[in-house]
Image (cartoon, grey):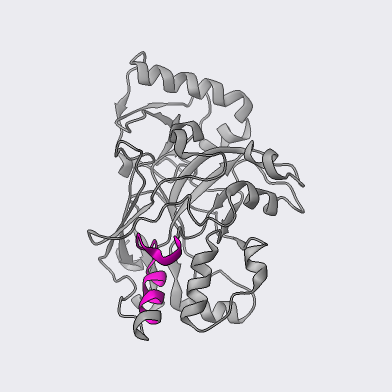
Amino acid sequence: MKLASLKQGRDGKLVVVSKDLSKYVGAGDIAPTMQAALDDWENTEPKLVALYDALQNGDVEGSDFNPCECDAPLPRSYHWVDGSAYVTHVELVRKARGAELPPSFWEDPLVYMGASDAFIGPCDDIEAGSEEWGIDLEAEVAVITDDVPAGTKGEDAKKHIKLVSILNDVSLRNLIPAELGKQFGFYQSKPWTAFAPVFATPDELGDAWDGAKVHLPLHAILNGEKIGSPNAGIDMTFDFAELIEHCAKSRSLVAGTVIGSGTVSNKGSHDGSCCLAEVRCLETIADGKPTTPFMSFGDRVEIDMFDADGNTIFGRIDQKVVPFNEA
C-alpha cells in the first residue's frame, strides 16, 4: 500500500496512491490525515489496504496523481529522530580531519531529535539565508512506527515498523561546527526535512525489505549529474530495529514517530555518495583539500529509489535551492 498527503492546511489530506503512482483516491472516510491513520493503525490499516486494492483493481475511479501537489506524507510529526547508522560515513568524515573514531561508535547508535513541526513536500524549495551556510543534501531512508512501548527490543522492534520512505535531510555544514562546539546542537544547522511523495508499507519493497533494512540503491542527483547511488542495505551498522530499540530504551515512542537512517553510505564509496560532505572528505583524503562546493541558489536536487524493474517506489524528491525571499 502507498499513502500520500495532498497539500491542505497544516496536516494535509490523506490519499491512497496506486502502485505505479499514477492515480490516487481520497481516504477521508477512513482517516482525514496520515497522523489520524497512524493513531488508530490497527483499525485503519485494513480499511486503507482494501481501498488500495480497489484502486489497483479499477473498482474505484482514481484521479491523476501529481507529486508536486503533495506535502510530506506526514506533514508534521510528534517525534522525528535522525540517526547516523552508516558508521563508515562518520569514520570517513573524521578521517578527513585527522580525528580517530571512538570504538563506542560501532557499538552504540548516534541519534538526535530533529525539527518535526513541519516537514516539507517532494517539490518544495530548499530555503536558505546564505550560500555561505554550506548547503548540503543528505539522502536517507526512513521508517514510521506505531506506538512503541518503552524497553522494546530486537525482533519486537521490527513489528512496529509500519511505513517506509526516503528523505532529504538538508544540512547547513558551515553552521554545524559552532553549534557542536557548544555541546548542544543541532538546531540552526538543520532546516526542514523533505520527504518523497509517498510512504509505502514494507511489503511494497518485496525481497528488498528484510524486516529492518532496505536492500536497494538510493540515488542522489545534483543538477542532472548523479553524485551517488550507494546501497541502503550495505554497511548499515545499526538497522532500523536496533535504532528503535535504542530510542525506546528509556521512554515509549508515539505513533507517527519518524526514524531516519542518516546519510546512506557504502565503505569506499564505490557507488558514490549521498551528500556533498562525503564527496569533499574523499577529495581531502586524496588531494589534501576539497574541490566540490556545497550547493548554490538555483541548484536542483533529486533523490529516488527504484525497484528491480526500474520503477520508482516512493516517487522522486525534486527540489530547488532558493534564498528565503524568493520562496
| Above/below status of 264 relative to 143 | below
Q: Quadrant of residue 321?
A: bottom left
Q: Residue sitting at 37 percent across and 39 percent down?
A: 313
How far across and down, in percent of the image, does residue 234 sit? 48, 53
Q: Residue furthest bottom?
A: 288
Relative image position of residue 232 (x, y in whole percent): 45, 51
Q: Quadrant of the N terminus?
A: top left
- Residue 258: x percent and y percent? 56, 48
Q: Is residue 132 placed above or below 135 in the rendered structure?
A: below
The residue segment tinted magenta is 266-284
Can you say which quadrant of the picture contains the C terminus?
bottom left
Question: Which sits in the foreground, 21 or 44?
Answer: 21
Residue 272 position, x and y percent, is: 35, 62
Residue 324 seen in the figure: yes
Q: Reply above or below: 120 against 66.
A: below
Q: Is residue 26 left or right of residue 61?
A: right
Q: Measuring 73% from the left and 44% from the top, which residue is drawn there? A: 152
188 left or right of 56?
right
Tell me which residue sits at (67%, 68%) in the image. Answer: 104
Q: Tell me if residue 13 can be seen.
A: no
Q: Is residue 256 above or below residue 36?
A: below
Q: Is residue 164 magenta?
A: no
Query: Is 273 part of what is drawn in magenta?
Result: yes
Q: Nearer the viewer, residue 50 or 244?
A: 244
Magenta stretch secondary structure, dominant = helix
| Residue at screen point 49% across, 41% down | 164
